Each structure stands twice: as C-alpha cells, then as structure tokens.
Amino acid sequence: MSALEVRPFRRDDRDQLTDLVNAHVAAVVPGVSVSTNTVLSALERQPDEFITDPWVSERVTLVAEQRRYVVAAAHLLRYRADAEVGESYRDAGEINWFVCHPRASFWPDADEAADLLMAACLARLARWDVRVRYADGSLPAPVVYGLPRNWPHIRAAYERAGFRHLGDTEVVLIARVADLPAPEPRPGVTVERGLGECGTRFTAYDGARALGFVEVDTALARPERHIRAAGLADLGNLRTEAEGWDRWLLAQAADWLRLCGVDRLVAYEEAADRAAIDRLTSAGFRELTRTDRGWEHRP
C-alpha cells in the first residue's frame, strides 16, 4: 500500500468526502443522505447552531489520503476566548466530527489512517493552545450527533487518542407514522394547530384549559441543502398535564404528518429517563440507536 498523507481539505476532495460522510450517516438513520453542497456549506458555517456557531473563530478540515483516495477526514472548530462566548465553550477546541473507513481485510491500514489523522487533529489543537479539547460526531445530517453506537471504529480512535465520554447518553427512537395511535374523538376536547418552539404545535383543550401539546418538525430536508430526508420528521416536544393524553396528541400529529407526506417520526430521550422511553415505545416507537454526548480529551 502507498504511504498515507494527512493534509488540509481541498475542494476537489468534495465528492469523496461526501461519500465518506454519507456512509456514516447511513449507519445511523435510514433513508438519509446529504449532498456535496450540504457538506461544503457545513465546512464554512453551521446555521442550525445559531447559538454556538457565532462563537467559532476558526475552522479547519483535514483529510487522510492514500493513493489519491480520501480514507478519513475531520472537521475542527476553535471557539473565541472573549466574554460573549458561553463559559464551557470559551477558549475551547473541538473535533466537530471525525470519519474514517473501518478496518477490513481489503484495507488493513484503516487504524493507521485514523491514528495519523487524529495525531494531526491533536497537533492543531495544541497549536491553537486551547483551554479544553472536545470531540463529537455532528455530521451535517438529521439525527446524527454525539457519538452514535453504530460507529465503534470512531469510538476506538477517540479512546486511543485519550478522549473520554464524560457527558450524557441519549436514546434516538423512530416510529412509522402508520404505527402511531389512530385519531379518536373525545367529547368536549378540541385541538388547535399553531407555531411552536420546535415546529408545528398541536394543543389539546378541554374548554379553556390546556391539557397538553405536541410539536413536530417537518422541515428537516431543506431544499437549498439537498438533504435526502423526505418523509422524516422530528418530535420536538410532547407535554401533557394528565396521564393518557400523550397518545391522543400523537394521533393528532400523525394525522397531520400523513397529510405532509411524512412516514417516519424521530424522537430523542435521555437514556436514564426510562418512563419517557416507555411512553414512546408503547405508542409505536422503537429504539434506533444510542449516542454518547460530551467527549473530552483526558490523556
């Protein structure tokens, strides 16, 4: 095999990088992929991260190449050190995402490529002289964040380099809209549709008293980014004042999602919140993956 080389990303790497990113996305969430334009845009700015993205002072993308083929890549962020930046991010450096091919019989150099690229990432963080070093796996695709359990090769590369999981674990759940509860009338109860914090909100009322609400976000696939995520939506919020109304509210949301052409709904819960997870699984959801958030360099 020819020698591995780590170097800065070049624009002519874009197609190979997109293929590598999509291979990792496909292992986490079904039916989702991103365009080359989406990947390139995310290297320059992350508009969805409207709080933390303005704090970034420098962005660097590195690739590991072998025989003119991009076999691994990483995107690094440096956060400003001034008072406008949140305390935990102030003067921090982050491997925002790290992707590489897993070790296989046809490619025994996979671990070497990952370690060589990781060494270059740590060297860049050292040159930045940041206060703390974080790591994540936030690819520019819906549902992919933290370090999904579907990427054991990335976890191994992080751990070999001295990163440790110090944060929370979240469970990502998915349901076919067809499997969600069916709408049923309840005398005296009305539902109003409006704009919520995380999408379209459906609020149940008994007269003037609000019984609870559910929010769904159907705008995961933005046309300008060319994300292939048609038929996928997020469950943003589900809040009820009394037991039993969550299924009724999910039925109202499901009816709307069918009109939107959505056939899958994704939800997120803390792994420790067993009651919330059981509430969703009893309504038609199943576990898609678990993702570990909050990685920090502790060599």
Image (spheres, rainbow, N blue to C red):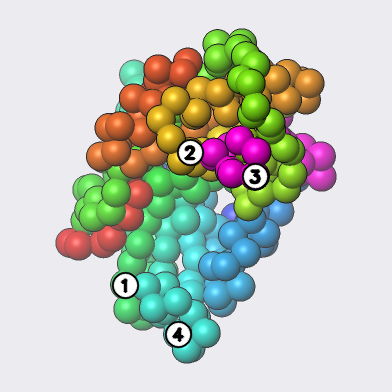
Residue holding disc 2: 240
Crowding at mark 1 (Cα within 10 Å: few <14, some 14-19, many 20+)? some
Residue 95 placed where, x, y %? 42, 58
Cβ–Cβ under 8 Å for marks 4 and 3? no
**Magenta-drawn segment:** 206-228
Instruction: Estimate the spatial distance between the alpha carbons at disc 1 and disc 4, rounded to whole Å.
Output: 11 Å
* Residue depth check, mark 4 versus mark 2: number of the one nearer the observer: 2
Q: Which mark is residue 62?
A: none
Q: Which mark is residue 81?
A: 4
* Residue depth check, mark 4 versus mark 3: number of the one nearer the observer: 3
Instruction: Estimate the spatial distance between the alpha carbons at disc 4 and disc 2, rounded to whole Å.
Output: 41 Å
Residue 65 placed where, x, y %? 51, 44
Residue holding disc 1: 132
Q: Residue at x 55, y 16 (%)?
A: 180
Looking at the rendering, in which quadrant would you find the N terminus? Answer: top left
Residue holding disc 3: 208
